[in-house]
Image (tube, rainbow, N blue to C red):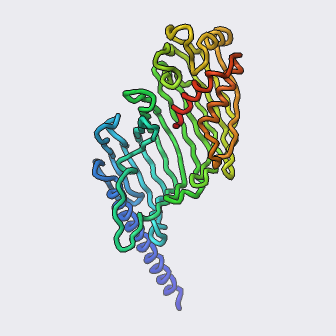
Amino acid sequence: MSRRTRLLLAAAVLAALAIAAVVGHRAAMHQLQTAVATALGPRASLRAIEVGWSGVVIEDLRVRAASGWPAEDELRARRVRLRPSLASLWRPGWHVASVTIDEGYVSLLRSRDGRLRVLPALTEKKPAPAHDGAGAGPAVHLGRIVLDGGAIDFFDASVRQPAHRMQLAELDATVGPIDWPALASPTTIDLKAQFKGPHRTGRLAIDGALTIATRDAQLKASVHGVDLVALQPYLLKVNEGGVRSGTLDLTLDARVKAQHLKAPGRLTLTGLELSSGGGVFSTFAGVPRQAVVAAMSRDGRIEFAFTLDGRLDDPSFSLNENLAAKLAGGLAETLGVSLGGVVEGVGGVIKGLFGR
């Protein structure tokens, strides 16, 4: 075979491979476009959905809320970019290399009974009846989810009516990979956001990894400078005086291995000022109000450390109750008061913020 013939043959093979790659990529794009349109459901709307070489782009996505939801929308985003993986062509299920969400918004609702509801339009669909042995749907692999400039409204109907609202803004996060529905792979989390309050804005950060199926985790979480007025329903009973000002800082280094949790943390209350009212026996998180006022007048802050320790698979172990007890003990010791009413008060805060 002559040199020229070999070159022509090589060029033809490369051209065929290039054409196959283009055709395969376009096929993956159209598969993903069809899956997205089906998954969004009837309450969703969008300005445009485009298929390009780099992926599927959805413009001005909106999922409207049903009647009775505390916000107008369950979900919206200025732009969603999905980049598929060619693995979808030869592996079962959907393989998405990355999902990038620009200026996304999500509203969450905790009902009166403490149940957290997230995107009910998508997650609370009635399953379609199976035909000819069809299963519940293909597995989905998400390589990476990126949130850029997002926002979250958290409405809590378990503490008061109408539902108490807390806001996260300027949320930037990278999460992945996620394998649905097995959820057996470690998922890394890097999240930063602002915690909005009436008087000031605090900061929230979460960093680490979590395996959802086994609950193995290594996570560091912190909140800094959170406005205590925004947490008022969790700290005070209806007949007590309100919070005028103050901030909360909390750090937690949580590790879970083989269902065993160990998580040292530290809590700081700074500049706490309480409104008058509530009477002589009024409390703050179950602690006598006078003890809190005296500590703040003397030191300007209340700070203590605690450690959570227990087995998550032990039926007698409750994360909420364990955390409440640890914080209650630290707060009582710091203020020099009896533990009596502290557990109940701090327990209400923890159960309110993290669930029942």
Is residue 150 left or right of 342 when viewed as pictured? left
Which residue is located at x 58 percent, y 39 percent? 206
Tell me if residue 112 comes above or below residue 137 in the rendering. Answer: above
Across and down, in percent, residue 291 comes to 64, 12
Res 217 visible: no
Which residue is located at x 53 percent, y 91 percent? 1
Is residue 324 left or right of 15 when viewed as pictured? right
Tell me if residue 242 comes above or below residue 68 in the rendering. Answer: above
Q: Quadrant of residue 127?
A: bottom left
Number of callouts in the render? Answer: 0
Q: Point out the residue furthest to the bottom here.
A: 1
Is residue 102 left or right of 184 when viewed as pictured? left
Which residue is located at x 45 percent, y 28 percent? 159
Which residue is nearer to you in this view: 76 or 339?
A: 339
Tell me if residue 22 comes above or below residue 208 in the rendering. Answer: below
Across and down, in percent, residue 38 comes to 33, 58
Across and down, in percent, residue 112 comes to 42, 35
Res 107 visible: yes
Is residue 177 left or right of 33 when viewed as pictured? right
Across and down, in percent, residue 320 comes to 59, 36
